[in-house]
Amino acid sequence: MADMKFRVKANSESATKTVVKARGFELIIDEPSELGGTNEGANPVEFLLAAYCGCINVMAHVIANEMNIELRSLKIKMAGELNPERLFGTSFEERAGYKGIKVTIEPDCDASNEELAKWLEAIEDRCPVSDNIKNLTPVELKLKQKK
């Protein structure tokens, strides 16, 4: 299968609110009021966790189907901690991103523990969002010059 390209476009509505268009969908990204936002949407790091949850959900179902596991339902809990000092420029001692992300997956199915261990390993191996979080992905940030 050939590579697929995904695109989004974003516009700043305020210092904290961003409106993102992805295909025919609109996402509102904003900060909570305690971080100076208007709390009109999840913030960027919450969207990262949400994207990871969504990817795990898709891969969990795809792989369960491949393994002939009837996945009746799936609950995913995810949490990450970060120090906002770098974000606000008050300290550069720690990285800006999450120090770690903890994920708990609770499947409702009749698979054995051995099958579920293989299922979980495949999810982690094949989830594109997990791959982007765990591995260095080249990013090219360019400034479009004024005309």
Image: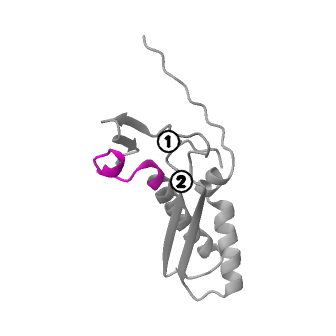
Q: How is the image coloured?
A: one colour
Judge left or right: residue 22 versus residue 74. Answer: left
Judge left or right: residue 41 versus residue 126. Answer: left
Residue 32 appears in the rendering: no
Amino acid type shown at disc 2:
Leu
Residue 129, position in %: x, y? 58, 54
Does the CB distance between marks 1 and 2 fall below 8 Å? Answer: yes
Q: Residue at x 35, y 34 (%)?
A: 12
Q: Earlier in the sequence, mark 1 or mark 2?
A: 2
Q: Residues within 10 Å of mark 2 (few under 14, many from 20)?
A: some
**Occupied quadrant, residue 5:** top right
The mark found on residue 5 in the picture is none
| Residue assigned mark 2 | 82
Amino acid type shown at disc 1:
Leu
Residue 94, position in %: x, y? 61, 46
- Name the foreground residue: 143 vs 100: 100
Residue 132 appears in the rendering: yes
Q: Residue at x 48, y 40 (%)?
A: 7
- Name the foreground residue: 100 vs 145: 100
Residue 3, position in %: x, y? 63, 44
- State whether residue 101 is above or below residue 25: below
Dominant secondary structure, magenta: loop
The mark found on residue 87 in the picture is 1
Which residues lie in the magenta part?
Answer: 31-46
Q: Residues within 10 Å of mark 1 (few under 14, many from 20)?
A: few
Q: Residue furthest top?
A: 147
Q: Residue at x 60, y 31 (%)?
A: 140
- Name the foreground residue: 17 vs 91: 91
Helix, strand or loop status at disc 2: loop
Helix, strand or loop status at disc 1: loop
